[in-house]
Image (cartoon, rainbow, N blue to C red):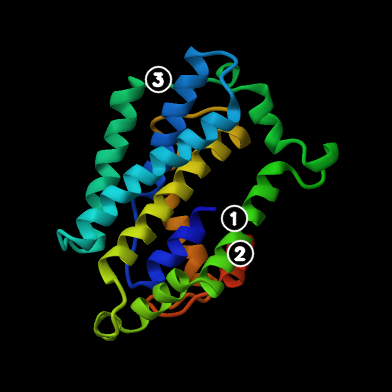
Amino acid sequence: VVAMGQMMVIIIRGIDVSVGSTLGFAGIVVGMIFRDNPGFNIFLGTLLGILIGAVLGAINGSLIAWVKIPPVITTLGTLSAYRGFVFIVGGGRQIDPNHIPVELIRWSQRGPFGSQLIPWVVVIALIVAVLFYLFLYFTKSGRNVYALGSNPEAARLRGIPVNSTTFMVYTITGAMAGLAGILYASRYGFVNPGETGVGFELTTIAAVVLGGTNVFGGSGSVLGTVLGCLLL
C-alpha cells in the first residue's frame, strides 16, 4: 500500500523517507481513539487514519512544491518531527492488543465470505494497486506524473501544473501511509511508538526500485512494484 505512493514519488524524481513515521502517527492516534472509545466504528477509524496521513503528506508536498526545499531534506526533517509527534501525542505508551477492535484484527485473519486463504488486508492492498493502475494510466493527472518525472522543465513549458502535481503525489503518499497504519494495527495487533513504522521507508523504496522504477524518474509500473513487494 505504501509502496504505491512511494512509486509515484520516485517517478517524479522525489523521495519520501517520512512514510514510516506517518504510518506510526496515524496508527497511534486512531489506536488511542479505539482505546478511549470502545465500540468506535472501524471504518470511520480507517477514514480518519487516511485523513491524518493525507494531512502529513500535504505538509511534505507544500514544503517541496512551493517552499522549494529538496525532497530528501524535507522528508528527513518530517521523519523526525512526525516520530516526535507519535511520542508526544501517545505519551510514549503502546496501544495494546486488547485495545484494538476484534473486527479490525479479523481483517488479517479472514477475507471475503469468511475465507482464511486471502484475508481482507491482502484484498485491500490489491484494490489499492488496481486503483493506482487506473489512475496512472487512464487519467490526465496520472499521465502528468510521468511527464513531470520525465522532464520537469518540459512539463512546465507544456502547461502541466508542476507544483500542484507534486503536492498531489505527496498527499496521496501520506494518505496511503495513514491507511497502512490501520492495516499494521490489524496485522500485528498493537501499535508501539518506538517500533511501528521504523525503517519502513527503506523497505518501500527497495520494493519500488526492485520493481523497476527508475530512480531518476519518469518510469515505473504498478505491477513491477507489486512484484517488488512480493520479492521482499
Residue at the spot 20% in from the left edge and 64% down from the top edge: 70
- What is the x, y in percent for residue 75? 27, 53
Residue placed most toward the observer, 199 or 127: 127
Residue placed most toward the observer, 122 or 91: 122
Disc 2 target residue? 226
Identity, as a three-letter code, of the amino acid under mark 1? Val
Residue at the spot 30% in from the left edge and 63% down from the top edge: 164
Residue 128, numbered label: 1
Sequence order check: which comes first, mark 2 or mark 1? Answer: 1
Sequence order check: which comes first, mark 2 or mark 3? Answer: 3
- Inspect this view and state whether residue 216 appears: no
Mark 2 element type: helix
Residue at the spot 48% in from the left edge and 75% down from the top edge: 213
- What is the x, y in percent for residue 101? 62, 22
Above or below 107: residue 17? below
How busy is the neighbourhood of tag 3: few (under 14 within 10 Å), some, or many (20 plus)?
Answer: some
How busy is the neighbourhood of tag 1: few (under 14 within 10 Å), some, or many (20 plus)?
Answer: some
Sequence order check: which comes first, mark 3 or mark 1? Answer: 3
Residue 93, numbered label: 3
Separation of marks 3 and 1 at Cα, in angstroms: 31 Å
Q: Going by the image, does 35 lie left or right of 144?
A: right
For the residues labelled 3 and 1, say whether their Cβ atoms are less than 8 Å apart. Answer: no
